């Protein structure tokens, strides 16, 4: 199958044509997401990401974070099952390992404070039976440190511009063209800002969100939304496109009502309405 050289514009009509999986009649049928990350410097990242996964329709979410933070996360995010992260060099707790193996999609990176911790997690996850893996933040920057064949076959990379340049080894010249090459090289779906690329060579461009998305925690919401759609069972490229578009649409909706200055937690809360905006085009 060949794809057009020019990127495909993402519109609500396109998303409505793609559709979403039938949610079924229980939380289990809507998929389970696991979010791994957090640090004393950024406790809220895993909460924002986990909430976003639920807000786009995932049925269950787990969080694995620094053991000093788990009580805080449990209090702030009662919907999540919360696990203590293992100590550096120590074994992974059996319950945590089982939850990762059982999750329909695993997100690693939000809120991690250093590349070494991210590298340790990628190595741990390479030993697990992970169906779909989404890498974000520090986990993106050190992705090339782990052999590709040790990571899950189904991989989504959610990069900001700096992280994309680390992976490329040079500045971004043309985002769509560079992401197309990066997706092929990494054998992964790659999202960065206004573009999503698949290993097949297909690229989608997005135009939504505006300046309001440049707020602390916004990227955690984005990563969680992509993971939530992946957990629901969408093809990887569609999960990334749906997540990126809904994140941007949530920003547009908030800008229309509030102007500049909305918070990342409000972005997460706006995601169900953003999903509905696309589904109404059916």
Image (tube, grey):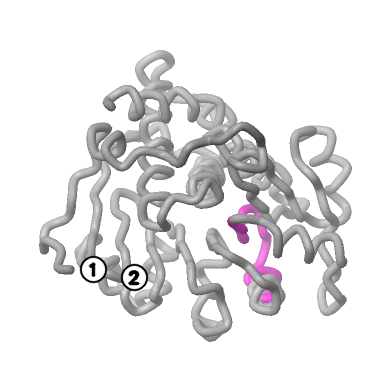
- Tell me where the magenta segment starts and ends, as one range: 105-120
Left-right relation of 49 to 9? right
**Residue 29 image position (x, y, % from top left):** 61, 42
**Residue 101 image position (x, y, % from top left):** 70, 64
Left-right relation of 123 to 97? left
Residue, far top? 257
> What's the residue at 79%, 41% (across, down)?
73
Q: Is residue 111 above or below residue 47?
A: below
Task: Please tell me in which quadrant of the rendered image residue 13 appears.
Answer: top left
Q: Which mark is residue 183?
A: 2
Q: Tell me the crowding category of disc 2: few under 14, some 14 to 19, or many 20 or more residues within 10 angstroms, Cα based.
A: many
Q: Which mark is residue 114?
A: none
Residues under labels 1 and 2: Cα distance? 8 Å
What is the quadrant of the C terminus in the image? top left
Tell me the SS state at disc 1. Answer: loop
The residue that disc 1 covers is 201
What is the quadrant of the N terminus in the image? bottom left
């Amino acid at each position: 199958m060949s794809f057009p050289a020019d990127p495909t514009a993402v519109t609500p009509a396109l998303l409505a044509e793609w559709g979403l999986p039938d949610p079924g009649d229980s939380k289990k049928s809507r998929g389970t997401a696991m979010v791994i990350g957090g640090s004393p410097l950024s406790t809220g990242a895993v909460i924002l990401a986990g909430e976003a996964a639920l807000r786009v329709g995932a049925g269950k979410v787990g969080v694995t974070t620094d053991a000093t933070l788990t009580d805080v996360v449990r209090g702030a995010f009662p919907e999540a099952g919360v696990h203590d992260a293992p100590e550096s060099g120590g074994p992974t707790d059996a319950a945590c390992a089982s939850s990762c193996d059982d999750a329909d999609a695993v997100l690693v990176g939000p809120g991690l404070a250093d590349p070494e911790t991210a590298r340790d997690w990628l190595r741990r996850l390479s030993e697990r039976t992970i169906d779909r893996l989404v890498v974000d933040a520090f986990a993106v920057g050190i992705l090339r440190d782990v052999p590709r064949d040790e990571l899950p076959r189904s991989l989504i990379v959610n990069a900001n511009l700096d992280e994309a340049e680390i992976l490329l080894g040079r500045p971004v010249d043309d985002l769509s063209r560079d992401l197309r090459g990066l997706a092929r090289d990494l054998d992964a779906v790659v999202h960065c800002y206004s573009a999503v690329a698949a290993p097949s060579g297909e690229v989608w461009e997005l135009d939504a969100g505006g300046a309001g998305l440049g707020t602390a925690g916004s990227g955690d919401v984005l990563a969680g939304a992509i993971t939530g759609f992946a957990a629901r069972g969408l093809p990887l490229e569609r999960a990334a496109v749906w997540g990126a578009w809904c994140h941007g649409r949530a920003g547009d909706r908030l800008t229309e009502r509030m102007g500049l200055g909305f918070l990342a937690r409000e972005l997460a809360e706006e995601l169900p309405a953003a999903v509905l905006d696309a589904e109404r085009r059916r």
